[in-house]
Image (cartoon, grey):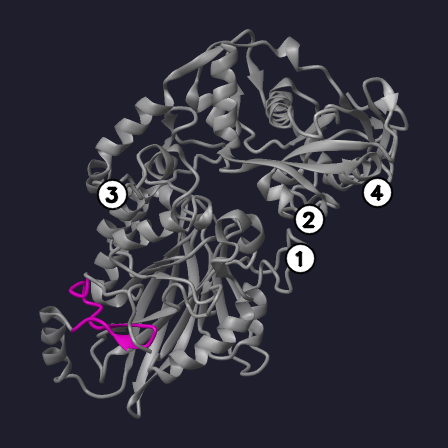
């Protein structure tokens, strides 16, 4: 297929990978080092087995350094994990030294440019889309320096709009792949579908490794405002079936899929799309010709999953490294050159832990100035708070810090509707515990405190729901809790079912009062639902302030995606919160922090 403006010409062919094919077209010549390797290969006997390793990251979410911009401190968790590409760089250098640079490839499975204040700053504050002298993106700088060979698009790449994705793509020294990211009007690829890299292993002709990039169809829902009418995202399995044979026909001896899609998780958008969200397992099982899959999206650690392809009987190896550069997957291949062709004889995978190595000082130095600029930005004081607010108990108690989100959203929507026909309707607001470590301190409140409470780039919308629909919405949310009979001991570790319902899909609704009776089965838990002291009329109309992820169907909550939209904002909710705090000057929990929902068993409060 002919190269177009968006096809990629690698500028790192001299890294011993030799020629690369993008979408089937040759785009780089062999380097002098590769030519020297050819000369050495001429003295090698035909046949014999060789090895190479494909390294993979996923869901980096803006982590370059081992730093938490929300706490303004070195990152740490209970397991003492470390994060960041500076750590990945050290591991990659070790593997390349051990295996030989010409026997390694490095790829990523998406969600690169969203997730920290570092990447937010270069999307919104000093954007890489600026017309004059745009800054370099810190993720592009770090990944180029480390020497990535390819990356797949993630769904969060589109949070800032297509122009930001394109600007990021332009700064990369490697292709950003998306076989199922298509132009809406033509349904032709908007990004290179795949790349073929050549490795010179010392026997016969170079080994051709095909890397196919696939992203998540849910982008069409989650970032509808940014992509509708511009791009479409068909199914992962369907597009793999289309492109894997093309890659083989183009000469790929080995096919690796970098898929921003989990192995077998449940969908979060129900029946709104005909394709599953987490289809890597199905793809491995049903699409012949795939040797390995770098899995992403679900933020889990899967060192190795083996799936037998139904058509060929061959085993496909899948691996997902833990998000935020906490782990590095390594696919170790054994191949054999015989009868003029390469054949895969063995594949296995493992994960390497970044907390076992120091940061690469070269990467630390590379983005040092950008890091310092963002640290100053997040530490600006935006107001004060009368008492400390913590989110720690939010998964099982109504806490003021979540009510603050609801209050800000309700106030904003109420002001937006003030001069409309909906001004007289009561305004409610949904909120969820996004970040279990969020704290707003007593005294000075800094920008990073508000940013740490609302970590996603969601925007705010308003939908009309009835009282009955609000109750359905809450019933759906209440599946977050395990069923617990009266008198049974309470174990906070098992009280919530985070595997089935992650924290970000546990919504409370600000503005109404209710009990959640966890002694009852899912669907029959919401009791005593009231508004301003009176039982909620099932037929009454309410305005629900809701984030765009939820409004577009994210989480598959009932009614809201189909409900009438009466107001929306293009500004991130995080920024709305920051502006609200600046305008108020002082956060007083007494203004919004009443307990309006609680867990009960047969009417008896759990706490």
Residue lying at 81% horizontally and 18% vertically, measured from the top left? 532
In percent of width and height, residue 19 lies at 21, 73
Is tag 4's residue or tag 2's residue first in the polypeptide sequence?
A: 4
For the residue carrying disc 3, how many other residues have a C-alpha within 10 Å: few (<14), some (14-19), or many (20+)?
some
What element does badge 4 sit on? loop
Residue range highlighted in magenta: 12-29
Residue at x 33%, y 37% (from the top left corner)? 122
Locate residue 158, reporting x and y percent: 45, 49
**Disc nearer the start of the sequence (3/2):** 3
Instruction: Check if residue 23 falls in the magenta segment.
Output: yes
Residue beneath disc 2: 556
Q: Tell which of 414 and 552 is nearer to you.
A: 414
Circle nearer the N terminus (1, 2): 1
Closer to the camera: disc 1 or disc 2?
Answer: 1
Q: Disc 3 on helix, strand or loop? A: loop
Name the element at disc 1.
Answer: loop
Residue that carries the numbered disc 3 in the rendered image: 136
Q: Residues within 10 Å of mark 4 (few under 14, many from 20)?
A: some
Q: Earlier in the sequence, mark 3 or mark 1?
A: 3
Marks 4/2: CA–CA distance: 15 Å
| Count of marks overlaid on the render | 4
Callouts 3 and 1 close, C-beta under 8 Å? no
Please name the residue shown 28% across and 77% down the image. Answer: 207
Residue at image mark 1: 272
Q: Position of residue 570 (x, y in %)?
A: 50, 37
Q: Read off the residue under disc 4.
A: 523
In the picture shown, does residue 11 fall above or below 209? Answer: above
């Amino acid at each position: 297929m002919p190269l177009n403006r968006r096809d990629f010409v690698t500028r790192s062919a001299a890294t011993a990978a030799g020629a690369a094919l993008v979408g089937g077209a040759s785009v780089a010549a062999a380097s002098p080092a590769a030519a020297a390797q050819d000369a050495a290969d001429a003295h090698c006997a035909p046949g014999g087995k060789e090895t190479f390793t494909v390294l993979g990251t996923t869901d980096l979410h803006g982590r370059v350094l081992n730093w938490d911009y929300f706490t303004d401190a070195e990152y740490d968790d209970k397991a003492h994990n470390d994060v960041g590409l500076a750590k990945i760089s050290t591991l990659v250098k070790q593997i390349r030294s051990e295996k030989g640079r010409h026997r390694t490839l490095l790829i990523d499975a998406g969600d690169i440019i969203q997730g920290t204040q570092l990447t937010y700053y270069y999307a919104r504050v000093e954007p890489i889309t600026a017309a004059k002298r745009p800054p370099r993106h810190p993720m592009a700088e770090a990944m180029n320096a480390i020497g990535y060979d390819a990356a797949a698009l993630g769904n969060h790449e589109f949070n800032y709009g297509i122009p930001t994705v394109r600007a990021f793509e332009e700064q990369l020294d490697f292709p950003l792949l998306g076989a199922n990211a298509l132009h809406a009007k033509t349904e032709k690829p908007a990004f290179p579908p795949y790349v073929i890299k050549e490795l010179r292993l010392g026997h016969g002709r170079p080994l051709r490794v095909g890397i196919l990039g696939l992203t998540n169809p849910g982008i069409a829902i989650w970032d509808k405002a940014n992509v509708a009418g511009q791009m479409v995202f068909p199914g992962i399995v369907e597009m793999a079936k289309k492109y894997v044979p093309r890659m083989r026909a183009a000469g790929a001896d080995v096919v690796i899929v970098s898929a921003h899609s989990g192995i077998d998780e449940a969908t979060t958008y129900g029946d709104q799309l005909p394709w599953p969200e987490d289809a890597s397992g199905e793809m491995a099982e049903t699409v012949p010709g795939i040797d390995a899959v770098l899995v992403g999206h679900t933020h889990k650690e899967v060192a190795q999953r083996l799936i037998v392809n139904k058509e060929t009987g061959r085993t496909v190896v899948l691996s997902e490294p833990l998000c935020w550069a906490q782990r590095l997957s390594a696919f170790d291949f054994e191949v054999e050159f015989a009868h003029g062709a390469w054949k895969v004889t063995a594949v296995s995978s493992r994960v390497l832990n970044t907390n076992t190595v120091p940061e690469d000082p070269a990467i630390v130095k590379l983005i040092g100035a950008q890091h310092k600029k963002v640290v100053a930005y997040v530490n600006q004081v935006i107001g004060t708070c009368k008492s400390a607010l913590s989110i720690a108990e939010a998964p099982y108690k109504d806490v003021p810090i979540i009510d603050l989100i609801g209050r800000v959203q309700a106030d904003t929507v109420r002001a937006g509707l003030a001069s409309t026909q909906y001004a007289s309707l009561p305004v409610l607001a949904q909120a969820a515990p996004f970040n279990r470590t969020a704290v707003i301190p007593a005294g000075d409140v800094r920008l990073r405190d508000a940013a740490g409470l609302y970590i996603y780039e969601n925007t705010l919308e308003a939908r009309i729901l009835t009282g009955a629909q609000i109750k359905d919405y809450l019933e759906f949310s209440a599946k977050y809790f395990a069923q617990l009979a009266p008198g049974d001991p309470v174990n906070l570790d098992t009280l919530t079912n985070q595997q089935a319902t992650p924290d970000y899909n546990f919504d409370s609704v600000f503005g109404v009062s209710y009990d959640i009776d966890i002694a009852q089965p899912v669907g029959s838990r919401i009791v005593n639902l009231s508004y301003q002291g009176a039982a909620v009329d099932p037929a009454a109309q309410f305005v629900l302030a809701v984030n765009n992820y939820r409004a577009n169907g994210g989480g598959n909550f009932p009614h809201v995606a189909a409900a009438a939209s009466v107001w929306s904002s293009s500004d991130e909710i995080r920024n709305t919160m920051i502006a609200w705090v600046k305008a108020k000057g002082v956060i007083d929990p007494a203004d919004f922090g009443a307990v309006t929902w609680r867990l009960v068993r047969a009417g008896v409060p759990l706490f």
